[in-house]
Amino acid sequence: MNPPDTNLVTVALLAVVAVSLVQGVWRGATGSAKRLFSFVAGAAMTLASVALAAWTASAASPAVQAWLVRRAWEQPKADSSIFIQIAYTVYSGIRDLPLLRFAVLFLIAYLMLRLVFGTIGSLLIRVGALPFSLVPSGGAVSRAFGGLIGAALGCGRALLLTVLLFGYCALFPQAPYADYVAESGLYQEAAARIIEPAAGRLIEERLPVFARKMQGELDQLWQKRYDVIDADLPSDIVLAAEKVTEGDETDEQKAKDLYNWVGSRIVYDYDKVTAYEERGEWREQTPSDTFSTRKGVCIDYARLYAAMARSVGLQVRVVTGLGYDGMGGYGPHAWNEVYLTEREAWVPLDATWAKTGDWFDPPGFQETHVRQA
């Protein structure tokens, strides 16, 4: 005889069914039937809201992006209030990041649909539940039927809990307790016999991909803060950038001259790295600080390069991710991407590594630099 499944997930799922069964016996056939009807109707309205919200968000996304582009909100100065800076970051993120825009539109549409369905649904549920008032209440027969209906309701609730756990394990396979959840025999049965056949590979394969892409876009949104923080360009940086690029006729010439200047003039600040790694002390510095001290780490190189490039009319962005450490591993790193109009393309560069070789759009750049987004 197999030992009993003492996994807490199994115990929890059985407890949900048992509690619902007891409640069904207590309420009798009439009350339990009303509860079951309300549960099914509520689940149907939720699914309908999700489907309609997804369709609405997909249909509205291009029009919303076009409207935001026409809005043409100029980047605020660095001395603007924190609320304006946050608002601009959110605005530019929704404008530029398609998954983030979809998520925002989906949430708005879903909340509106739930409000509408909630109002209409409550009336429909009351009307639909009227026939159940004809079911005899009280007595052993009523309580027996109530128990059966309660057990069915409990199975629905347990299945809903299983779906949530399945989504958690699919999204975060390395998360705490994910392996423990998967060890539950009852969970395995429900996942294999009900969830996977019903959803196909949607939850297990596509949802994690969507989550990773969404995380990537949120990382890009987080990186956009540098566009606002470093928007106010000091005159000494502007003058230096203009002098470095004097006589350059193309974006590529400007971008490469600035790459060479930053890469050769700034010294890597190993003391700053040591202070952070050993004492948890992070010394935040602006492009102006890096320019004046001629010292910094990768993010400081990247921010200074971006500030100088913008001052001579180049489109540039700061990119964060992982860089090859030369010993078979990767560590946190930052670099830049600059837009070259003559190529009509964004190209990568790493001024921090400039003293070790040519890191201005070299072949195989992506093999040593893994961007977060």
Image: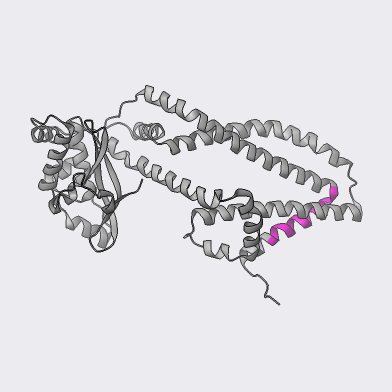
Q: Can residue 294 be seen in this snapshot? A: no
Nearer-the-camera pick, 91 or 85: 91
Q: Residue 69: image x %, image y %? A: 37, 25
Left or right of 206: which side holds 184? Answer: right
In terms of image quadrants, where is residue 110? top right
Compared with 215, 307 (above or below) is above
Q: Residue 151: image x %, image y %? A: 77, 55
> Looking at this rendering, what residue extends furthest in the bottom direction?
1
Tell me which residue sits at (16%, 53%) in the image. 268
* Residue 19 magenta-highlighted: yes
Left or right of 161: which side holds 279? Answer: left
How many numbered dots are placed on residues in this image? Answer: 0
Compared with 273, 127 (above or below) is above
> Looking at this rendering, what residue extends furthest in the top direction?
70
Tell me which residue sits at (46%, 48%) in the image. 209
> Where's the C terminus, which quadrant?
top left
Q: Which residues are magenta?
A: 14-29
In terms of image quadrants, where is residue 94? top left
Tell me which residue sits at (56%, 51%) in the image. 201
Q: Can residue 72 be seen in this snapshot? A: yes
Q: Residue 68: image x %, image y %? A: 40, 26
> Where's the N terminus, which quadrant?
bottom right
Q: Residue 5: image x %, image y %? A: 65, 70
Left or right of 267: which side holds 329? Answer: right
User: Which color scheme is applied?
Assistant: one colour
* Residue 198 magenta-highlighted: no
Magenta stretch prevailing secondary structure = helix
Tell me which residue sits at (61%, 32%) in the image. 113
Compared with 4, 297 (above or below) is above
